[in-house]
């Protein structure tokens, strides 16, 4: 199930379909919702007025690879480009180094290697499914790096793993955010 932010809906004029407002994108579907949850087929309904051509999948060191297939299939169905961004948050690396008494550079190197491994895993699945991908690894705070990429590449939708620490992305983003 995909969770989106800023969703409202109203009954359409025909009395049967519902119009969904997700940020600035409108959708129509016959499917019903419960609160702010929509089945993935509602998001990719054939009646949508706006097409999402560029998705960005945000990954961190705590992201599991279980979301990769779902993201690739969504991009395949929508014929969208997939930008994959692995963010290494320096403050978390510093905190981990303090707690474990390890060298910061050693931890950075390990996290960066794991990041590239995850990025290449996403790329392999996307290429096998015929989805265009662009891989990126950046150091910095999640919201700042994400904002830079959304603006630089004209991204339409943010895909992110649901966690407590990603609430700030849901709140600060100016485009639709899908929590997986």
Image (cartoon, rainbow, N blue to C red):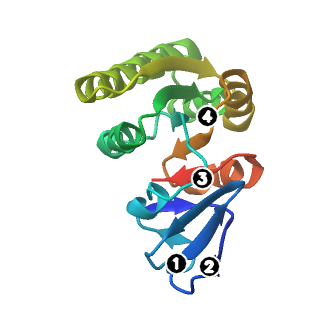
- For the residues labelled 3 and 1, the Cα–Cα distance comes to 14 Å
- For the residues labelled 1 and 4, the Cα–Cα distance comes to 46 Å
Q: Quadrant of residue 1?
A: bottom left
Left or right: residue 75 versus residue 160 is left
- For the residues labelled 3 and 2, the Cα–Cα distance comes to 14 Å
**Tag of residue 92:** 4
Q: Residue at x 69, y 46 (%)?
A: 175
* Residue at the extreme front: 14
Q: How crowded is mark 1: few (under 14 residues within 10 Å), some or many (20 or more)?
A: some
Circle 1 SS class: loop
Q: Is residue 49 above or below residue 28?
A: above
Instruction: Give the labeled residue for mark 3.
Output: 49
Q: From the viewer's perspective, is the residue at label 2 or at label 4 nearer? A: 2
Q: Which residue is drawn at 63% across and 21% down?
A: 139
Sequence-wise, the earlier of marks 2 and 4 is 2
- For the residues labelled 2 and 4, the Cα–Cα distance comes to 47 Å
Q: Residues within 10 Å of mark 4 (few under 14, many from 20)?
A: few
Left or right: residue 140 versus residue 136 is right
**Tag of residue 135:** none
Sequence-wise, the earlier of marks 3 and 1 is 1
Left or right: residue 21 versus residue 102 is right
Circle 4 SS class: helix
Closer to us: 142 or 100: 142
**Tag of residue 12:** 2
Q: Is residue 17 above or below residue 172?
A: below
| Residue 42 drawn at (x, y percent) | 45, 64
Residue 1 appears anywhere in the view: no
Q: Residues within 10 Å of mark 3 (few under 14, many from 20)?
A: few
Closer to us: 129 or 62: 129
Sequence-wise, the earlier of marks 4 and 3 is 3
Instruction: Give the labeled residue for mark 1.
Output: 17
């Amino acid at each position: 199930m995909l969770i989106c932010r800023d969703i409202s809906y109203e009954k359409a004029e025909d009395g049967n379909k519902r119009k969904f407002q997700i940020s600035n994108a409108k959708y129509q579907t016959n499917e019903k919702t419960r609160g702010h949850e929509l089945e993935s087929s509602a998001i990719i309904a054939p009646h949508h007025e706006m097409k999402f051509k560029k998705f960005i999948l945000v990954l961190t060191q705590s992201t599991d690879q279980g979301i990769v297939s779902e993201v690739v299939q969504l991009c395949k169905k929508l014929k969208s480009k997939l930008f994959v961004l692995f963010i290494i948050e320096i403050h978390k690396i510093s905190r981990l180094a303090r707690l474990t008494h390890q060298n910061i550079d050693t931890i950075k190197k390990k996290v960066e290697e794991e990041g590239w491994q995850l990025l290449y895993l996403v790329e392999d699945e996307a290429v096998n499914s015929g989805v265009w991908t662009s891989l990126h690894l950046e150091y910095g705070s999640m919201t700042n790096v994400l904002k830079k990429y959304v603006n630089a590449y004209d991204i339409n939708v943010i895909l992110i793993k649901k966690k407590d620490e990603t609430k700030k992305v849901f709140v600060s983003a100016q485009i639709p955010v899908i929590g997986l």
